[in-house]
């Protein structure tokens, strides 16, 4: 099997595009080392004071832990709901499957501000029932994030199910397996990587969600994106630049580990 190798012109164009896309990200690196109390390029000595603020200021740690908690809960809920929905469509093939899929992915196509206002009124109504799951609560925020991330999980799981051979399900049904056995022992193991991908994408989307979060939180449930937004709006805290550099470094590290893993596990023929 022959492999296509890009020429030097293609590689040069790819490098230029990469530089064009990465330059705005790299510009935040020197800003994070400024000794000033506002966002600015360092003119003299470089300082680590804003990196120290991320460790010493409990607001940042609390916001990070809250964002992780909300992300884990919301991604788990959205992935489980998406998995049940997709399994039902795939196994029973209802007549109006396309319409059901359209309703499921509706939050993906509706303008975010419309979803945010709708979820605001929903959570304020739930506050009358229980304050722990209503407006400005971490459970309420997790519920709102689940609504926003579930369409993406539905799409990924449906793509995974499209690659499953239906004959294995027919064989299991012919051998007397129940619906639960077919789903748990036959279908789910064949789409486990799609489920994991859906969970990870839902977590990332919840981690960076800000539009809906601004509508459904106030002073109690302050996630990391909301705290960063407050810092930019109120006093332009340079600690935001330091946090951005840390997140960029973590992302590059994860991508590098993934690239090394794929390179080591690739067969010599690939």
Image: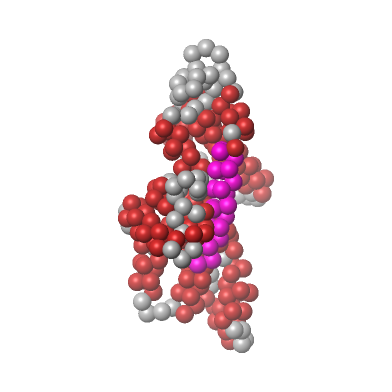
Residue occupying the point 59% across, 63% down: 192
Give the dominant element type of the magenta stretch: helix, strand or loop. helix
Instruction: Please tell me in which quadrant of the rendered image residue 174 appears.
Output: bottom right
- Front residue (pair 18, 40): 40
- Front residue (pair 204, 19): 204
Asked if residue 156 lies in the magenta stretch, the reply is no
Q: Is residue 198 above or below residue 167?
A: above
Kindly tell me whether residue 115 is visible in this rendering. Answer: no
Point out residue 100 in the picture as x, y percentages from the top left corner. Answer: 38, 71
Point out residue 147 in the picture as x, y percentages from the top left corner. Answer: 44, 60
Residue occupying the point 52% across, 76% down: 166
What span is colored magenta in the figure?
A: 59-81
| Residue extending furthest toward the top | 44
**Total labels drawn:** 0
Please indicate whether residue 185 sits to the left or right of residue 223 in the image: right
Q: Is residue 68 above or below residue 134?
A: above
Q: Is residue 137 above or below residue 60?
A: below
Kindly tell me whether residue 262 is visible in this rendering. Answer: yes
Residue occupying the point 61% across, 68% down: 189
């Amino acid at each position: 099997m022959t492999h296509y190798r890009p020429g030097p012109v293609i590689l040069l164009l790819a490098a230029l595009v990469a530089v064009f896309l990465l330059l705005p990200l790299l510009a935040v690196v020197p800003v994070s080392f400024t000794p000033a109390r506002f966002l600015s390029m360092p003119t003299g000595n470089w300082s680590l004071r804003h990196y120290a603020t991320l460790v010493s200021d409990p607001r940042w740690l609390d916001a990070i832990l809250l964002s992780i908690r909300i992300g884990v809960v919301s991604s788990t809920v959205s992935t489980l709901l998406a998995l049940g929905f997709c399994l039902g469509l795939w196994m029973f093939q209802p007549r109006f499957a396309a319409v059901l899929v359209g309703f499921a992915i509706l939050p993906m196509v509706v303008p975010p501000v419309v979803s945010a206002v709708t979820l605001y009124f929903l959570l304020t109504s739930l506050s009358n029932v229980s304050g722990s799951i209503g407006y400005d609560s971490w459970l309420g925020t997790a519920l709102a994030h689940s609504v926003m991330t579930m369409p993406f999980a539905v799409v990924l799981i449906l793509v995974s199910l499209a690659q499953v051979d239906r004959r294995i399900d027919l064989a299991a049904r012919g051998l007397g397996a129940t619906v639960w056995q077919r789903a748990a022992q036959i279908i789910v193991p064949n789409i486990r990587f799609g489920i994991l991908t859906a969970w990870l994408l839902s977590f990332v989307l919840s981690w960076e969600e800000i539009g809906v979060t601004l509508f459904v939180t106030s002073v109690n449930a302050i996630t990391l994106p909301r705290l960063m937004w407050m810092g930019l709006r109120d006093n332009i805290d340079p600690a935001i630049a330091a946090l951005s550099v840390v997140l960029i470094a973590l992302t590059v590290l994860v991508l590098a580990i993934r690239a090394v893993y794929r390179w080591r596990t690739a067969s010599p023929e690939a």
